[in-house]
Image (cartoon, grey):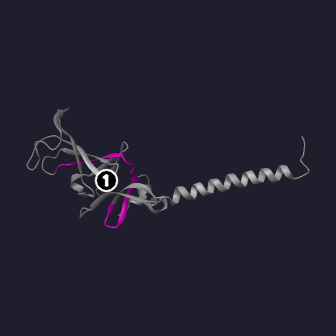
Amino acid sequence: MRRDVSGRGMTRRRWCWCLVMTVAILLGIATVAYPLPWLAVKQGAEWRLALPGWAGTTFKIRWMHSVEKEDWEEWYRITADGAIEITGTRFKTFGAGVPAHAGKETHLADGWVVMTGIDRVVDPLAIQAAVAEHYRMIFAGHVIPLSRHDPPPILTFSVVKAPVWQVLPALLRPWLPWLNQP
């Protein structure tokens, strides 16, 4: 094994190591500090949830209809402008106040009435998440309960640009149950 007695090899290695660490630290700081789009679910001023909110992101809101006692589901998408739009809905039966044609197509599928092509901006989206209606959000295949307690919380959904450090508790809340305490 050869040793570099001149000290140049060690200095070069240290310099490379310092450069790599500096770049890693700067990238870490930029990642945490740079504002990213988040789908924010707020209860008043409190952030309940923060989920990735890039253009094209989709999610669903599902609840049990208070009269029909059947699930109802609405589908949403984040537009290129960062707005929330309803794209479709599905439900089991027509009732009072349900339009016959809300979108471009209405059809039956597996016992559901499905309306697609609604494509109407509903930003911000406000939902009163009553416990009796069992409100939940479906995001990336995960079901996230929205109902908490009485009186039912009014939840506001919007797209907000913020750095990771500002949304961290709301970002972790769906995955850490102890953060969900009222």
Check disc 1 and report its element: helix, strand or loop.
loop
In magenta stretch: residue 40: no
Residue tagged 1: 83
Q: Could you say which quadrant of the image residue 46 lies in? A: bottom left
Tell me which segment is drawn in magenta: 42-65
Whether residue 35 sits left or right of residue 130 in the image: it is right
Q: Quadrant of the C terminus?
A: bottom left
- Category of crowding for the residue at label 1, using alpha-carbon neighbours closer than 10 angstroms: few (below 14), some (14–19), many (at least 20): some
Image vertical order of residue 170 relative to residue 97, above or below: below
Q: Residue at x 9, y 46 (%)?
A: 95
What amino acid type is highlighted by mark number 1? Ala
Q: Closest to the observer: 99 or 104?
A: 104
Asked if one can make out residue 148 in the rendered structure from this viewpoint, the answer is no
Q: Closest to the observer: 81 or 130?
A: 81
Asked if one can make out residue 164 in the rendered structure from this viewpoint, the answer is yes
Q: Quadrant of the N terminus?
A: top right
Q: Position of residue 169 (x, y in %)?
A: 44, 60
Image vertical order of residue 61 relative to residue 149, above or below: above
Q: Closest to the observer: 81 or 51?
A: 81
